[in-house]
């Protein structure tokens, strides 16, 4: 899913019009309409960050192909635990998880 499709998906999921999206992120209606009507017109990174803010998601969630609403309960718990791990230990956790994944292949 590209950036414009992801924004549109979030907008539709929340029942927002293009105009409401524009108002919420602080840009003109014309700007938002241009994203969907002009092939080479893309929102800026700052605008994408504002989209994430208004929809309550992180940039990582925005760019992820994972639909957070479809995660199993255990997957959500795993993410919550991972977020609680100090940054200096996150790489170790990732290596441990990768090693378990390789054993099952």
Image (tube, rainbow, N blue to C red):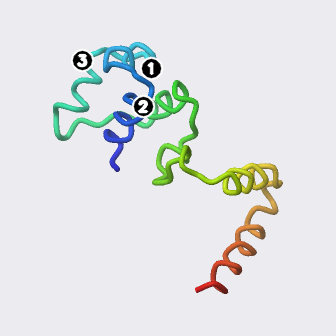
Q: Earlier in the sequence, mark 2 or mark 3?
A: 2
Q: Is residue 105 above or below residue 43?
A: below
In the rendered view, tell whether residue 104 sits above or below residue 56.
Answer: below
The quadrant in which residue 37 appears is top left
Q: Which residue is mark 3?
A: 30
In the picture provided, is 67 more to the left or to the right than 75? left
Residue situated in front as seen by the camera: 81 or 4 = 81
Q: How many residues crowd around disc 3 within 10 Å: few (fewer than 14), some, or many (20 or more)?
A: few
Whole-angstrom CA distance, mark 2 to mark 3, is 21 Å
Q: Residue at x 37, y 36 (%)?
A: 9
Q: Residue, x 46% and y 29% (percent of image)?
A: 51
Cα distance between the residues tagged 1 and 2: 16 Å
Q: Where residue 95 appears, x then y in whole percent?
A: 72, 74
Q: CA distance from mark 1 to mark 3?
A: 13 Å
101 over 31 or under it: above or below:
below
Is there a contact, CB below 8 Å, between mark 1 and mark 2?
Answer: no
x, y (%) of residue 55? Answer: 52, 28
Quadrant of the frame with the C terminus: bottom right
Q: Position of residue 68 (x, y in %)?
A: 55, 46
Toward the left, the furthest residue is: 38
Q: Which element is circle 1 on?
A: helix
Q: Secondary structure at mark 2?
A: helix
Sequence order check, earlier mark of 1 and 2: 2
Residue position for label 1: 25
85 relative position to 70: left or right: right
Among numbered discs 1 and 3, the one appearing first in the sequence: 1
Do labels 2 and 3 touch, CB within 8 Å? Answer: no
Kindly identify which residue carries mark 2: 13
Disc 3 is placed on an element classified as helix
Camera-side residue of 28 and 103: 103
Q: Nearer the viewer, residue 44 or 9?
A: 9
Residue at 52% over, 24% down: 54
């Amino acid at each position: 899913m590209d950036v414009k499709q992801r924004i549109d998906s979030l907008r539709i999921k929340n029942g927002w019009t293009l105009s409401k999206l524009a108002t919420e992120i602080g840009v003109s209606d014309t700007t938002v309409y241009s994203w969907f009507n002009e092939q080479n017109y893309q929102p800026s990174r700052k605008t994408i960050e504002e989209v994430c803010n208004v929809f309550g998601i992180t940039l990582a969630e925005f760019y992820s192909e994972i639909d957070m609403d479809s995660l199993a309960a255990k997957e959500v718990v795993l993410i919550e635990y991972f977020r609680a791990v100090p940054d200096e230990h996150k790489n170790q956790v990732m290596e441990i998880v990768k090693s378990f994944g390789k054993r099952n292949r």
